Image (cartoon, rainbow, N blue to C red):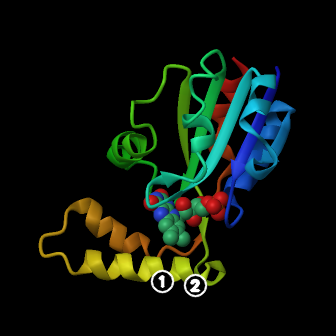
Amino acid sequence: MNAIVIYKTKYGSTKTYAEWIAEELGCEAIDAKEIKAEDLLNYDTIIYGGGLYAEVINGVALISKNIEKLSEKKIIVYTTGITPLDCREYYDNLVLQRNFKNGVPENVKIYNFLGKMVLEELSVVHRTALKTLKKIMSGKENPTEMEKLLVELCDADGDFCNRDDIFELVQYAKK
Ligand SMILES: Cc1cc2nc3c(=O)[nH]c(=O)nc-3n(C[C@H](O)[C@H](O)[C@H](O)COP(=O)(O)O)c2cc1C
């Protein structure tokens, strides 16, 4: 299989998954900074991973902006985030709509994994952003279940990466 795993990471969780996946597939994992869109044409299977930041998959434009050129490729996109994986409404609607404005193309399959958020590792900008989000959400009069969850998630603190979760992605990539 001629595959590559590309990742964009700020705190390391997406890279951790990239290395696990690459190890299972026997291919290379490479930082998105080191690859250009034209290089993607050299591979049949392209796996792209990015952390979620305000529902945006970090750096996914590398795939979404070049989707026409990549129409013959098998593409897998994975996210890492702190939203529980059973929040399907969040992943299947909100995240997908925000990142694939024209819908997810047929040759693209999406997987979601839990990442890490260790509060003391976060940049000042990110810590401030989370504090502001928490303040806004906490001030809502009749918060939805999702808004209540968001307030809780602002205080999430830990590493939730789990190698077992890549199993299905790896099986699909090998098919
Ligand atoms: C400012 C900020 C915004 C975030 N937004 C989201 C989000 O919208 N959804 C989510 O599930 N996780 C969110 N997270 C958690 C990150 O996605 C999570 O820590 C991810 O694993 C980071 O991946 P990386 O370290 O590889 O960049 C956010 C974290 C920060 C610091």
Counting from the top left corner in percent of width and height, residue 61 is at 57, 43
Query: Residue 142 occupies which quadrant of the picture?
Result: bottom left
149 vs 117, left or right, is: left
Q: Quadrant of the C terminus?
A: top right
Q: Amino acid at mark 1?
A: Thr
Q: Residue placed at 66% from the left, 19% from the top? A: 73
Is the residue 153 above or below the residue 51 in the image?
below
Task: Tell me the element at label 2.
Answer: helix
Q: Residue placed at 39% from the left, 37% from the top? A: 101
Residue 104 visible, this orientation: yes
Residue density around tag 2, few if under 14, some if 14–19, many if 20 or more, within 10 Å: few
149 vs 25, left or right, is: left
Q: Which residue was labeled with disc 1?
A: 128
Q: Quadrant of the N terminus?
A: top right
**Residue 29, which numbered label?**
none
Counting from the top left corner in percent of width and height, residue 120 is at 63, 84
Residues marked 2 and 1 touching at CB (< 8 Å): yes
22 vs 136, left or right, is: right
Counting from the top left corner in percent of width and height, residue 146 is at 28, 60
Real-space Cα separation, disc 2 to disc 1, in angstroms: 6 Å
Q: Amino acid at mark 2?
A: Val
Q: Residue placed at 42% from the left, 83% from the top? A: 131
Task: Tell me the element at label 1.
Answer: helix
Residue density around tag 1, few if under 14, some if 14–19, many if 20 or more, within 10 Å: few
96 vs 163, left or right, is: left
Q: Which residue was labeled with disc 2?
A: 124
Residue 160 visible, this orientation: no
Is the residue 67 above or below the residue 93 in the image?
above
Counting from the top left corner in percent of width and height, residue 107 is at 56, 20
